[in-house]
Amino acid sequence: MNNNRVSPVSVRCWVTLIVLCVASLAAHLALLPQLPDAVPLHFGASGEVDGWGAKWQALLLDVLPLALLALFYLVPRIDPKGHNYERSGKVYQLFVVLFTLMMMAMTWAPELVAFGLVSGDSFGLVVPLMVGVLLVVLGNYLPRVRDNYTFGFRTPWALDDESNWRRTQRFGGVVLIVSGLAFVLAALMGGGVLWFVLAAGLTIAGAIGAYAYSYLLWRASK
């Protein structure tokens, strides 16, 4: 592990995200006494509440954005090819920002539903939309990602050959964009289990396709 590597995420970005996560957690703690004893903790594909728990259990979800930030900070430092994160532009920083903000927003689902500010069904629309936007944005930037062991479509054949890696990430970028648009469409169609399953199925099929494409590239080079 190389602790001297320059972080692909700027110090200002880290500080801003940490402050936002801490402020969000503090707000959760301030509202904790006002929550009912049982709060919604899990939502089905169509947004309906299908899991309840004690209000203190919601705190486990509330600290998740901070825990993920710590993980995102460590990843480039423990990745054997972590130096390539610095050569990938701001793609990793963009991912960290978008994913952290999305997770932070999702931590407020128990309070919003418990206080009657939104219905559980709303999350059947909002979550696919957020996931879709995240995938579309990442798909556009994925071809810029240099080879590493943690981020991107990390097939063994792509990690073994730089050309394979570039072509696999370009293919994977298209997969993410198409999958993201499918999730956005699922939200625009009103959500629901069927649309969510179709979008998720397309994402899985695309990921399998990217691995197959990487393998075929490797076979063709032999």
Image (cartoon, rainbow, N blue to C red):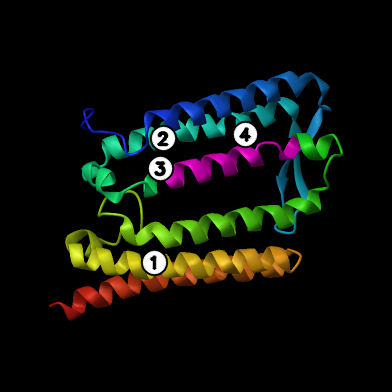
For the residue pair 9 and 200, the one nearer the viewer reads as 9
**Would you say the residues marked 3 and 2 are in contact, meaning their CB atoms lie under 8 Å apart?**
no
- 1 or 3: mark nearer the eye: 3
**Amino acid at circle 3:** Gln
Please tell me which of labels 3 and 2 falls first in the chain. Answer: 2
Please tell me which of labels 1 and 4 falls first in the chain. Answer: 4
Q: Which residue is mark 1?
A: 172
- Could you say which quadrant of the image residue 34 lies in? top right
Distance (Cα) linking label 1 and label 3: 19 Å
Is residue 97 positioned above or below 11 on the image? below
Mark 4 falls on what kind of element?
helix
Q: Which mark is residue 93?
A: 3
Q: Which mark is residue 20?
A: none
Distance (Cα) linking label 2 and label 4: 15 Å
For the residue pair 167 and 37, the one nearer the viewer reads as 167
Please tell me which of labels 3 and 4 falls first in the chain. Answer: 4
- 3 or 4: mark nearer the eye: 3
Mark 1 falls on what kind of element?
helix
Distance (Cα) linking label 3 and label 4: 23 Å
Residue sitting at x 45%, y 71%: 206
Q: Which residue is mark 2?
A: 71
Q: Which residue is mark 4?
A: 61
Residue 89 part of the magenta segment: no
**Amino acid at circle 1:** Gly
**Amino acid at circle 4:** Leu
Please tell me which of labels 2 and 4 falls first in the chain. Answer: 4
Residue 100 part of the magenta segment: yes
**Would you say the residues marked 2 and 4 are in contact, meaning their CB atoms lie under 8 Å apart?**
no
